[in-house]
Image: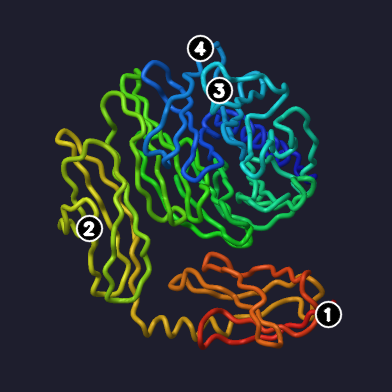
Amino acid sequence: MLKRSGNPNLLRRKIILLLLIGLFINTLAFADYHITRGPDIGEIYFIGPTATTEEGLYHSTDFGETATCMDSLLHTGWDLMSICADKTPGVIYGYSMPENLYISYDYGQYGSWIFRAPNCSYKLESGRNEGEIFCSSYRSSENYGFNFVQHYCLGVSEYIIDFALDSEELVGYAITYDTTNDSINIYKTYDNFDNCFIKHKLGLNDYSFEISGGTIDGELFIFAKSLKEIYYTEDGGNTFRYVNTFHNNGLDFTGLIGGRQEGDVYLLATYISGLSIDKHIYIFKSTDNGQTFEVYHTFSYGEEPLVANFSSAQTDSIVPVTVQFCNYSVGDIQTYEWDFNNDGIIDSYEPEPEYTYQDTGYYSVKLTINNGDESDEFLRDNYIHIINQSSVDEEVEHYKLLLNNSPNPFENCTTINYSLPADIPKANIKIYNLKGQLVEDIPINSQSNSVEWNSKNLSSGIYFYKINSDNSLVNKMIKIK
């Protein structure tokens, strides 16, 4: 909802911007929701090109390493625009224009699709329970789409770009774009989107996003599609951290989905040449929440694109350190050239090398790949950050003094404020009762400076909290109800 402005021209500009955002999001509608997880570990469905059509439905039971085309989708004159699966083996839902929901009880096999409901959204979400399906955050069914109940998303005043379900019952997330502040708002619900509460703001001037829940409570992935960046939270949206950036060079990243094991996340990428002569599907699979990947070339037809991609799980460390690089480039690659400090000198020709940094500082890393006819390169600017131990000790002394909470005393909720330097990207706030028993362990990161603690399940009394460092300051707070 737009607030009334004293400047009518400003109000008109905001209205026009909102309309443009809505139009832009609609153009992205059929590039989203192209991958979903099944009920089993390693089971995924995805939409991608086939040898004879530009879109087919695939099913994989081995994390995307191999897949079977279940349906070429164009045989009946309707296109499957988006998909999702619930926890019932073999059940998958599909959206087709105009606003129709279909269901298959046979893994999406040709001829198994059944019309289920009209007037549905392409934004499908499921995977938490058998028979549970959401058609946007405003409608859901618990009986395979036979009947729907309405949700109201009270508390959300902007257009909902995407939404996701948590693994915890009734909990979910919605993402919006705030035109006033040019930021992304993350809302959380505890009652299946009847009521929503803002949990976090990401200062990203972009509104092309896809989100997915993970396999543990409070886990959420965000893929900024225009920026090709992944963000992650493991504390229910209180804090987010940047995880990774991708290089595309012609690849179309069309979907993100969390897996069935802790740390698992998939990214779907497709490639179709201008005349559809060359078609390829790649599944990028991570086991460490998107820090590093391995890539499966699931479908191949014609000449491959050449795309350089790499990362490392260790980007911040203490000197000296040996860094292992993970390469997930695609193409008929004949040579690899690594420059670990971007000085123009090739340091390694191995596919997945390691390199020892002996001095402190920021290091840019570049990978150049070649297939004999052409090359592609990916430069990560200031990617590796190396410091010495004395710097860590100084930073610890600095942030241990910046730890407090407000209000204090409090009833159920209080906000814990902290300062965590970029050199220490992740930590935990540990909360203890008077007996010294740990009652809460809250993950934090350097991209935020506060976290809300809800203690409604604990009794009143005195509690102590600290950042998980041996010499961290210990503070006291009092719960009065």
Lower sequence index among marks 4 and 2: 4
Report, in whole angstroms, how far the alpha carbon at label 1 lies from the one at label 4. Answer: 66 Å
Give the residue number, with chain letter if any, for mark 3.
Answer: 80
The quarter of the picture where residue 151 lies is top right
Q: Nearer the viewer, residue 420 or 3?
A: 420
Residue at the spot x=14%, y=36% of the render? Answer: 372
Lower sequence index among marks 1 and 2: 2
Give the residue number, with chain letter if any, for mark 2.
Answer: 353
Amino acid on which the number 3 mark rests in the picture: Leu
Mark 4 or 2: in front is: 4
The quarter of the image holding the N terminus is: top right
Q: Are marks 1 and 2 in contact (CB under 8 Å)?
A: no
Q: Residues within 10 Å of mark 4 (few under 14, many from 20)?
A: few
Report, in whole angstroms, how far the alpha carbon at label 4 lies from the one at label 2. Answer: 47 Å
Q: Nearer the viewer, residue 369 or 193?
A: 193
- Residue 75: numbered disc: 4
